[in-house]
């Protein structure tokens, strides 16, 4: 019997990768529900291709402009996860939450009660709302699987290991497009060049975060929360080949590493099967030559000054929400060419020290609404701040 799969954010890069995996494993899985915010034509084509009769479109106004095409094909459209799944008599086997940005938090929490397994690839949801996600996972007895390649690698390497025996966990970074460049030499570099990631095909926002090393800082924060280890247990290593995704060093003297090609389809495929069933083989072979001269490098804080952020505490307070919101705003401004590349680094570190924000660093949000209100508060402050500049 085929297992039901829910994909929240099916029109994004992780969602599309998940559909590619399902396409090659149709004998094992079927799509129960797809969702998008406003990519109407993409989700319509996905629904037709995978014969999905139920979809969620969060942007109701966008849907109403194209209502007729869905009705013609008898595709049921809902505007929330609960509306679409509340009549379910049993949980689906697996749900992938692949919506990018903080607005992916609520749909992620909403879908937990409808699935036995949750695969999550939304950084902002984990960084800003992990305690709420964790509470719902426990309440609904839903198994959690991190889908980011680094966290999936750690999750795999820690399998059946006692976390007390972990000495150090290394998360690898490619170093981005400016690995060997002095920050002052690229202070005015164009977004076009900053978007040229050497190894991964990613969206614009995450590509800029990769260049600044912010993406890896986010991953350390995620890992601390997911694996319940202190920040000093984690270290970032630059690995330009991006073939090794994580290394776990144990107090026993053993170190384990996990390697795979730069495609999200590999962690997604393995998370679906969870090592319990025969897997339709993915079309890639072990590249032993990539292990020749692995070339691990400790990142230079002069070139990646945002690494100073790792000195802050990450205790599920408003700090994480403020950090994500400021970075989101600065990257958006850079992509719009209203600030320089070096300004992302300088302004982020400066703004985090503003008394307007620091007063919240020991306060924890009580619910999702407080997280959403803090995001609005940060954006309103930045609107005024940069207007005055």
Image (spheres, grey):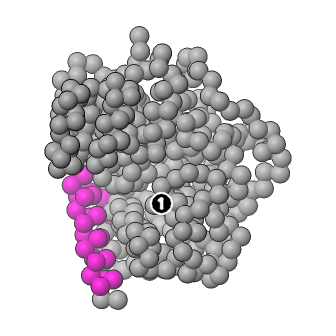
Which quadrant is home to the C terminus? bottom left
**Few, some or many C-alpha atoms within 10 Å of disc 1 (few <14, some 14-19, many ≥20)?**
some
Vertical placement of residue 361 versus 293, above or below = below
Vertical placement of residue 308 versus 141, above or below = below
Vertical placement of residue 2 versus 312, above or below = above
Quickly name the residue at label 1: 204
Quadrant housing residue 313: bottom left
Magenta residues, dominant SS class: helix
Residue sticking out furthest to the bottom: 389
Task: Tell me if residue 335 is in the magenta stretch.
Answer: no
In this orientation, does residue 34 appear?
Answer: yes
Q: Which of 157 and 182 is in front in this view?
A: 182
Measuring 38% from the left and 43% from the top, which residue is drawn there?
11
Q: What stretch is highlighted in magenta?
A: 361-387
Give the image location of residue 215, x and y in percent: 52, 59
Q: Nearer the viewer, residue 351 or 14?
A: 14
Residue sticking out furthest to the top: 1
Give the image location of residue 250, x and y in percent: 69, 42
Give the image location of residue 54, x and y in percent: 25, 29
Quadrant housing residue 291: top right
Which quadrant is home to the N terminus? top left
Label 1 element class: helix
Measuring 68% from the left and 58% from the top, which residue is drawn there?
238
Q: Nearer the viewer, residue 145 or 240?
A: 240
Q: Which of 104 and 130 is in front in this view?
A: 104
Give the image location of residue 348, x and y in percent: 45, 75
Measuring 57% from the left and 74% from the top, which residue is drawn there?
305
Relative horizontal placement of residue 224, taking residue 368 as reference (left or right): right
In this orientation, does residue 330 appear?
Answer: no
- Figure label count: 1
Quadrant housing residue 63: top left
Relative horizontal placement of residue 356, taking residue 230 as reference (left or right): left
């Amino acid at each position: 019997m085929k297992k039901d799969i829910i994909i929240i954010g099916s029109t994004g890069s992780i969602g599309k990768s998940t559909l590619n995996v399902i396409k090659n494993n149709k004998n094992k899985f079927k799509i129960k529900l797809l969702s998008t915010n406003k990519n109407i034509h993409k989700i319509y084509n996905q629904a037709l291709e995978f014969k999905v009769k139920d979809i969620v479109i969060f942007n109701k106004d966008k849907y109403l402009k194209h209502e007729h095409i869905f009705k013609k094909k008898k595709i049921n459209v809902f505007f929330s996860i609960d509306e679409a799944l509340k009549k379910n008599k049993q949980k689906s086997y697996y749900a992938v939450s692949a919506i990018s940005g903080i607005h992916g938090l609520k749909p992620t929490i909403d879908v937990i009660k409808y699935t036995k397994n949750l695969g999550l690839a939304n950084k902002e949801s984990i960084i800003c709302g992990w305690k709420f996600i964790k509470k719902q996972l426990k309440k609904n007895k839903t198994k959690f699987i991190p889908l980011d390649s680094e966290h999936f690698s750690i999750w795999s390497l820690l399998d059946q290991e006692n976390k007390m025996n972990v000495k150090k966990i290394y998360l690898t970074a490619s170093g981005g497009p400016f690995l060997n460049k002095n920050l002052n030499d690229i202070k005015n570099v164009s977004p076009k060049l900053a978007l040229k990631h050497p190894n991964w095909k990613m969206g614009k926002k995450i590509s800029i975060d990769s260049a600044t090393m912010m993406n890896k800082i986010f991953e350390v924060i995620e890992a601390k929360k997911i694996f319940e280890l202190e920040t000093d247990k984690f270290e970032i290593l630059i690995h330009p080949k991006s073939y090794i995704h994580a290394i776990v060093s144990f107090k026993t003297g053993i170190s384990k590493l996990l390697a795979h090609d730069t495609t999200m389809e590999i962690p997604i495929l393995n998370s679906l099967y969870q090592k319990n069933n025969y897997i339709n083989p993915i079309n890639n072979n072990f590249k032993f030559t990539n292990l020749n001269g692995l070339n691990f490098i400790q990142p230079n804080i002069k070139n990646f000054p945002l690494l100073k952020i790792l000195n802050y505490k990450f205790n599920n307070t408003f700090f994480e929400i403020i950090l994500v919101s400021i970075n989101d705003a600065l990257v958006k401004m850079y992509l719009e060419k209203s600030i320089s590349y070096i300004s992302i680094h300088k302004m982020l570190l400066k703004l985090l020290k503003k008394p307007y924000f620091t007063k919240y660093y020991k306060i924890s949000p009580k619910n999702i609404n407080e997280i959403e209100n803090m995001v609005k508060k940060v954006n309103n402050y930045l609107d005024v701040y940069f207007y005055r500049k």
